[in-house]
Image (spheres, rainbow, N blue to C red):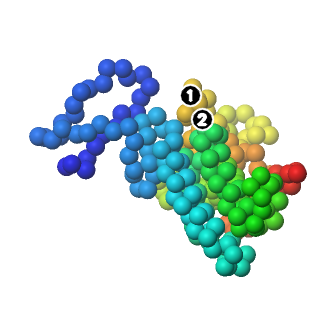
Amino acid sequence: MQKTKYMLFSKSIHNLPLDIAFGDFVLENVSNIKFLGVTVDNQLSWKFHINNICKVISRNIGIINRLKFHLPLASLLMLYSSLILPYLNYGILTWGNTHVTLLDKLLLLQKKALRIIFNMAPRSHTDSLFLDNNILKIKDLYLFQLGQFMYNYNNNTLPAIFDEMFLKNKLVHKYPTRHSGEYYLPLLRTLLAQNTFIYNGPKFWNTLSDYIKNATSFNLFKKRIKLLLLQSYKTAS
């Protein structure tokens, strides 16, 4: 029972209970806790989770830095894929649309890792490195995973628990329009709700071209959407 804790999620509760007991045990109130590998905080800011990721990635960048003169480039890129990328991808649909200032911490680490791998100066531009090596920045990793989720949803390949999570406009509005086949976006009162993948999934899917959405296989869809996301790096100096 000592491992059991509780957390209150609210911005409107001012008079909080002093103690919550379960039988004879008084539960500890915490502001953040790790759950299934993701650190959740009571403001759902994901600050603690991202800070934890930054610590792990910084340590792993140190490993890459010590090995950069002893391994070929292909091996260093493999280390990026094994020591950095998994931590960026894990649970990203949950936290990946948080405030840009938090995501920028991870982006800076991505840039640092690539500069070390390619033996470039600390302030050198990195967009060409992302583009030439098919590496997505943190914000685009989120969109990449979001697109995959929506592709699977649209093709009915997700578990049954996700059935009817989203509605098409044609099921909400009976009159035909050119947007009837798109997903319906409900009006949400809070920015927090708008930052969830439940809202951003349909929103992002609606922006994709039919060429991407109508890919005949999951692997083809991933290839097309990744190419789309990489296009934005071409404007880099």
Give residue 57's position: percent from left, percent from top.
Answer: 56, 59
Query: Crowdedness of circle 2 by 10 Å Cα count: few (<14), some, many (20+)?
Result: some
Q: CA distance from mark 2 to mark 1?
A: 7 Å
Q: Is residue 51 left or right of residue 149?
A: left
Image height of 99 relative to 154, above or below = above
Say if residue 222 shows up in the picture.
Answer: no
Q: Which residue is located at x 60 percent, y 63 percent?
A: 61
Q: Nearer the viewer, residue 41 or 127?
A: 127
Mark 2: amino acid? Gln
Res 74 → quadrant: bottom right
* Above or below for 157 versus 167: below
Q: Label 2, on which residue? A: 194
Left or right of residue 61: residue 120: right
Q: Position of residue 226 (x, y in %)?
A: 74, 60
Left-right relation of 205 to 164: right
Q: Residue at x 21, y 48 (%)?
A: 2
Residue contact between numbered discs 2 and 1, judged by CB atoms under 8 Å: yes
Residue at 44% x, 25% y is 11
The secondary structure type at the circle numbered 2 is helix
The answer to whether residue 121 is seen in the rendering is yes
Q: Is residue 73 or residue 161 the one in the foreground? A: 73
Q: What mark, if any, has residue 130 been given in the picture?
A: none
Q: Determine whether 49 is above or below 185 in the image.
A: below
Q: Secondary structure at mark 1?
A: loop
- Picture coordinates of residue 33 (x, y %)? 38, 46
Position of residue 83 measured from the top left corner of the image (x, y, whole percent): 57, 67
Q: Residue at x 71, y 67 (%)?
A: 117
Mark 1 is surrounded, within 10 Å at the Cα level, by few (under 14), some (14 to 19) or many (20 or more) other residues, namely few
Quadrant housing residue 118? bottom right
Residue labelled with disc 1? 190
Q: Residue furthest left?
A: 24
Give the amino acid type for the residue marked by disc 1 in the picture: Thr
